[in-house]
Image: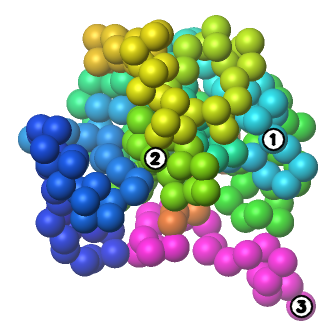
Amino acid sequence: MTYPSGRVHPQLVFDEPAAVVWAAQMNTVVFHAWPSRAGNPDNPDQLRIDLDPQPGTALAEATAAALGMREVLAEAGLAAFVKTSGNRGLHLYAPIRPDWEFLDVRHAVIAAARELERRRPDAVTTAWWKELRGERIFLDYNQAARDRTIAGAYSPRPLPAATVSTPVSWEELEAGVDPSAFTVRTVPDRLAAVGDPWAGMADAAGGIETLLGWWERDVADGHGELPFPPDYPKMPGEPPRVQPSRARKPD
């Protein structure tokens, strides 16, 4: 694969349990899966949003943001699935048809995040710069950029308790979950008892046409591109890639 930074690197495809065991014995802890398939790597079949708590916020605020984002995605015709990050936040996934490239999917995520930000400006933010986020949940739209991955479902995290990024049902999330309770020791029994809340995800694939319509609407209103990750080249329409407090002030 050729990355946006220009570097080239092979990707591993794990298509049988033995390959996962091999990776584990090679000291792999976190598995970062791409949001696209090996046969069509440039077209994601998952729309992903990372709900990242900022100082002064915690899981309760991330849960409220997740429920709000679920409503936004439902209005756009998408089914949302949620999991713990294995640390402090939550990850939202929406299965989509692989009909769009990464840039389109990133724009769809930005459109959804902006819509939730308009509805809950005191609770969530799309501000890329930490100094602008305040005590709000950051809707990390750049996790939808090509070459960006997040801890996969059922992946352990490199933390003292060996917590696991664990899919949960929306009913469980609303009732209150304790991410620290999901560990490499407890998740196998959980799977045996309650099954996989994401079992039907692939059958719920939708389209991002509505979200792309929202993106075009926002662009027409003067709300265009947002900053890309720092290892990206300067992208068309991208605002200045400089921290606001360090930006040159007009004379």
The image shows residue 211, relative to residue 184, as above or below, that is: above
Q: Is residue 1 left or right of residue 220?
A: left
Kindly identify the amino acid type of the residue bearing the numbered disc 3. Answer: Asp
Give me the residue at 36% from left, 51% from top: 32
Name which of mark 3 and mark 1 comes first in the sequence: 1
| Labels 1 and 2: the sequence-earlier one | 1
Count residues near mark 1 (Cα–Cα under 10 Å), then give few for <14, some for 14-19, many for 20+. Answer: some
- Quadrant hosting residue 176: top right
- Report the side of 45 relative to 22 (left or right): right
- Report the residue marked by disc 3: 251
Residue of label 1 = 58
Where residue 78 appears, as percent x and y from the top left, is 46, 16
Give the amino acid at mark 1.
Ala
Residue at point 66%, 38% (across, down)? 180
Residue density around tag 3, few if under 14, some if 14–19, many if 20 or more, within 10 Å: few
Instruction: Provide the secondary structure element on which disc 1 rests.
Output: loop
Q: State which region is magenta.
A: 230-251
Tell me the SS state at disc 2: loop
Magenta stretch: includes residue 231: yes
Residue assigned mark 2: 156
Give the x, y percent position of residue 41. 19, 47
